[in-house]
Image: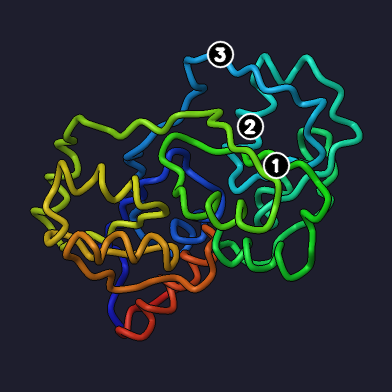
Amino acid sequence: MKSVNNINIILTNEYFERGFQKLKDSGLNTFHFPMIKTKSVINEIKINLDLIDCIIFVSKNGVRYFFENENTKKYDLSNKYFVCIGKKTANKLIKMGYKPGYICGKNYSMEMSKELKINKVLESKKSLLVQGTLSNPMFYNSLSKFSKVKKEVFYQTIKTKKESKEIKMLTLKNKPYVVFSSPSAFEAFSSLYNPKDFHIISIGRTTSAAIEKNGFRPELTSKMQTYEGISESLLKFLKNYNYEIS
């Protein structure tokens, strides 16, 4: 069996998530170099939430920045119907003190759209889709075909523009693995480094499609679009190459 002591894993998401802890616990060297950061939008949001029945969240960041917004704080949201994509987003909403009315089982926005349509979740509701500056417009376009929905951008995603000497140094050793959890993280990374110098790991179909569109191919795409899921997938992947996983 081969040792994992020389395997370096670069994590590119904004925060170090607990779901990646299993990689460290298994003896892999993990390095956190965020390729994106988020913050509230500069422009003032003036949407009248009294006219909205349902609020749709597709990310934890969406939940966070929606409730942090000064316009949101003006309204009583106790009777609003909340729709969330996946358990992670739903748990973030619960931590904010609100109960999800509907949690979509799939962690892909287009699958979410189909699910909401089939189950008539948005029927007879005026809905608000909470988004970021780099959100894929396809989801909103799909929802608008069968529901009364508005969209509003509550946060902006900023790509890292400064090269890291540490990442460059890692490529001089064994070829590192780099984990991408969003297309924007890959875009930021590939503008600073040559992806060919890394083993590319992707957290889901959407991210993998963006990577392939740019001319590269992930060595592994996690079927489970969670940090725990990508950790499990990567450890299983390494086991198949005869690495000793504790």
Point out residue 28 in the picture as x, y percentages from the top left corner: 36, 61
Residue in the image at 81% along x and 46% along y: 125
Q: Is residue 182 above or below residue 126?
A: below
Residue extending farthest left: 172
For disc 3, the marked residue is: 44
At a point 69% along the width and 26% down the height, the residue shown is 67
Q: Nearer the viewer, mark 1 or mark 3?
A: 3
Which residue is drawn at the image coordinates 65% and 44% (left, top)? 57
Between 18 and 107, the residue placed more toward the observer is: 107
Q: Is residue 227 above or below residue 17?
A: below
Expressed as whole percent of the image width and height from the top left, the position of residue 34 reads 35, 39
- Find disc 2 in the rendering and name its residue: 64
Residue placed most toward the observer, 119 or 155:
119
- Marker disc for residue 92: 1
Instruction: Determine if residue 146 is in view.
Output: yes
> Is 149 placed above or below 97 here?
below
- Secondary structure under tag 1 reads helix
Nearer the N terminus, badge 1 or badge 2? 2
What residue is rendered at 15% in x and 41% in y? 192
What amino acid is labelled 3 in the image?
Answer: Glu
| Amino acid on which disc 2 is placed | Arg
Front in this rendered view, residue 164 or 185: 185
Amino acid at circle 1: Lys
- Contact flag, marks 1 and 3 (Cβ < 8 Å): no
Frontmost residue, 111 versus 32: 111
User: Can you name the residue that lies furthest to the right here?
Assistant: 79
Task: Determine the CA span between mark 3 and mark 2.
Answer: 17 Å
Give the mark nearest the N terminus, 1 or 3. Answer: 3
Q: Earlier in the sequence, mark 3 or mark 2?
A: 3
Circles 1 and 2, Cβ within 8 Å, touching? The answer is: yes
Q: Judge depth for marks 3 and 2 and give the one in front.
A: 3
